[in-house]
Amino acid sequence: MKRFSHRPAAATGLPWRYRDRGNYHARMAPIDRRVRVWAWLVRRQGSIDAKSDAEIIAMRSRPTPSNAVVSRIFGTVVPGTTVRDRVIDGPGGNLPVRVYRPARAGSGARPLILNFHGGGFVFGDLRLADWMCSSVAVTVGAVVVSVDYRLAPGHRFPAAVDDCYAALVWAAEHAADLGAGGAGEEAAAPRIGVMGESAGGNLSAVTCLLARDRGGPRISHQALLYPPTDLTRMPPNAAKSLIISEPEMLAFQRLYLGGADPADPRASPLLAKDHSGLPPALIQVAEHDPLREDGVRYAAALRSAGVPVRFTEYVGMPHGYLNFPGLCRSAPQAMAEICAEQKAALTRPAAVVPR
């Protein structure tokens, strides 16, 4: 019997197992064998915690192979999407972005969604998000702008934060040129959402805080996918993680922050003094992810501040499950939930024509 892998939050805002930590590990669902094999293959490449900055930059410069196997594992641009690469002015110079639009003309105003990829603030690129961004563009009927923000260790905190916020402001100012919003009699500013997985989830949460505090573009929805929200602490289960180990998490933090204060809310959005007035959120976490608790705690913080939150835990899943739709069985289901939540929050209902 197939086990249903979508578990919404209980009425208290916390998953039922989170309130029973003593039996948590005994009741965890097993991870698929093919995911375990993939994790073993990744570990054979060596851990970043033992590599120098120069070695990490050299690793990152290697082109991602383009073939049927890679496309099968990571997904690719879904049919019905038009893709355009652009370069905008960023705080540190040229800032590449990739714009996804549904190829079919639609009725009504198109929402505008900013995407920030994952990769521990050190790795990741626009290709990593092709499947996610194109799925959102086609399913939601949105214009999606994916941001190739600057990476550590060459560009440490807050370079990525500055790039993501600058991209938000640029996209909002150029919404009509991007094809977002309405046209003619339907002309209107688009509703704006942000989304990101892992490090990109952190940057999405931080961007929402900055937009609120700086009087920036109004964000109507945030999709935070297994986000790290508190960089001041090591998650309790990091030592047993399958995809990212405790030494790797420490290395990512060191490479990203350098000597910066991890308690800065731009690095640890959970530690912001005030979470009120932030946009409604979808927060997804994975059962076998050391960052699971960060998502749980952020969902609780938002709810305590009166922010509507949908919290979902995907059982049997490791960190990064949306990066591997060809391996992780729950990835399509999680993607469908993201699109459904964004569509509900960002699309305007069709106008009723009087008879």
Image (tube, rainbow, N blue to C red):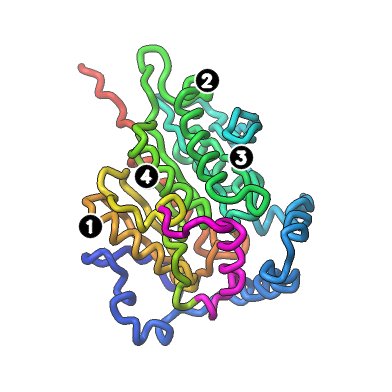
Label placed on residue 177: 2
Nearer the observer: mark 3 or 4; the answer is: 4
Pointers 2 and 1 in contact (C-beta within 8 Å): no
- Picture coordinates of residue 316 (x, y %)? 48, 73
Q: CA distance from mark 1 to mark 3?
A: 41 Å
Query: Are circles 2 and 3 on residues that touch, CB within 8 Å?
Result: no
| Quadrant occupied by the C terminus | top left
Q: CA distance from mark 2 to mark 3?
A: 23 Å
Q: In the rendered structure, which amino acid carries the disc numbered 1?
A: Ser
Where does label 4 land, which residue? Answer: 209
Disc with the residue nearer the chain's start (4 vs 2) = 2
- Select label 2 or label 1 by which is in front: 1
Badge 3 vs badge 4, beta-carbon distance below 8 Å = no
Do tag 4 and tag 2 residues touch (Cβ < 8 Å)? no
Q: Quadrant of the N terminus?
A: bottom left
Q: Is residue 225 left or right of residue 163?
A: left
Q: Which residue is outermost to the front?
A: 259
Eye-nearest disc, 4 or 2: 4
For numbered disc 2, what is the local secondary structure?
A: helix
Which segment did they paint magenta?
238-264
Q: Position of residue 171 (x, y in %)?
A: 49, 29
Residue 258 is one of the magenta-drawn residues: yes
Residue 219 lies in magenta, yes or no?
no
Q: Quadrant of residue 109?
A: top left
The numbered mark, 1 or 3, whose residue comes first in the sequence reads: 3
Q: Which residue is mark 3?
A: 79
What residue is pinned by disc 1? 304
Q: Earlier in the sequence, mark 2 or mark 1?
A: 2
